[in-house]
Amino acid sequence: MSEPAEKKTPLYLEHVRLGARMVPFGGWLMPVQYTSIVDEHQTVRNAVGMFDISHMGQFIVSGSNARDWLNTMLTNNVAKLDVGQGQYTFLLNYDGGVIDDLILYRIGETEFLLVVNASKIEEDFCWLEKHRQDGTMLKNRSADFGGVAIQGPRVVDLFHDLLGQSVELPARNHIIDFVISEMPVSIARTGYTGEDGVEVFFRVSDATKVWNLVLERGARLGAKPCGLGARDTLRLEMCYPLNGSDLSAERNPIEAGLGFF
């Protein structure tokens, strides 16, 4: 039996157009580099780089019991989150092994956004659905929403250009809804590089427009598209874990040296 075809993000054609080297990753065809890994690494450290994260999963959990139920499913204390705040956390199996590491955002009084790893979308959703309680709704919106991570010391300058000089980005680990060029977006002050940066979530239909707008407005700041290669060297430099390598279903977060999370 042949292997299933690799999935493509809504930005696939943009990556090809820009000459990216495409490789399989977690069931997706993703750009590993455009120019070179070193060049893209330095772009993020010194200017601003943009990564396609549309392959990652996005779940919405809502309902009167959403907060309390999530607190039984995830390791960090969901009750500490105010509306607009996010936290890094783990989804564990019965033995305490890591199914996935993810970011949880509280986007309403009784509504939460979970951003999960691409290779774990189906497994995470099935696990959560299996344990879902009354008063809780779970929706997988991954096919309808994309995302980009925009990272680097010039990110504030870039978004002042996009949003206006008087508009402030959310604080670290917070998320706020904005409108950019008539496109509704959610901007979170989070990332996987160790630099200041944001992750932006938007409708799939707006993906190409968001991507090209950021590159166009960011050109004067040295903005460039970046691939998985630089993402990996950047996170290694910061000692950030990688699911499937540093994290697995056979090791709990403490055994993985991540008890401080």
Image (cartoon, rainbow, N blue to C red):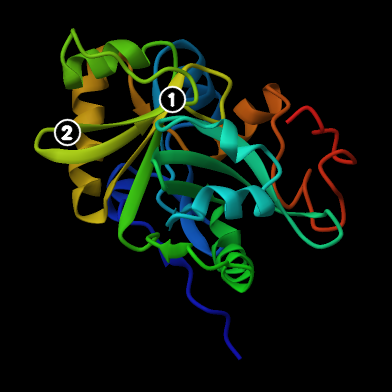
Q: Is residue 100 visible?
A: no
Q: Position of residue 164 (x, y in %)?
A: 15, 14
Residue at image position (59%, 71%) is 126
**Whether residue 10 can be seen here:** yes
Under mark 1, the amino acid is Arg
Labelled pair 2, 1 in contact (Cβ < 8 Å): no
Q: Position of residue 206 (x, y in %)?
A: 19, 48
Residue at (60, 64) in percent of width and height: 128
Indicate whether 140 appears above or below 20: below
What mark, if any, has residue 259 been given in the picture?
Answer: none
* Mark 2, other Cα within 10 Å: few <14 / some 14–19 / many ≥20: few
Secondary structure under the numbered disc 2 in the rendered image: strand
- On the rendered structure, is 23 left or right of 156? right
Give the labeled residue for mark 2.
179
Question: Which of marks 1 and 2 precedes in the sequence?
Answer: 2
Question: Total label count?
Answer: 2
Q: Say whether residue 169 is left or right of residue 236.
A: left
Tell me the residue that label 1 is attached to.
189
Per the model, the C-alpha gap separating discs 2 and 1 is: 16 Å
Q: Position of residue 3 (x, y in %)?
A: 58, 80
Q: Quadrant of the N terminus?
A: bottom right
The amino acid type of the residue labelled 2 equals Val
Direction from residue 96 to residue 219 in the image, left or right: left
Residue at 53% in and 47% down: 67
Seen as rendered, the residue at the extreme right is: 255
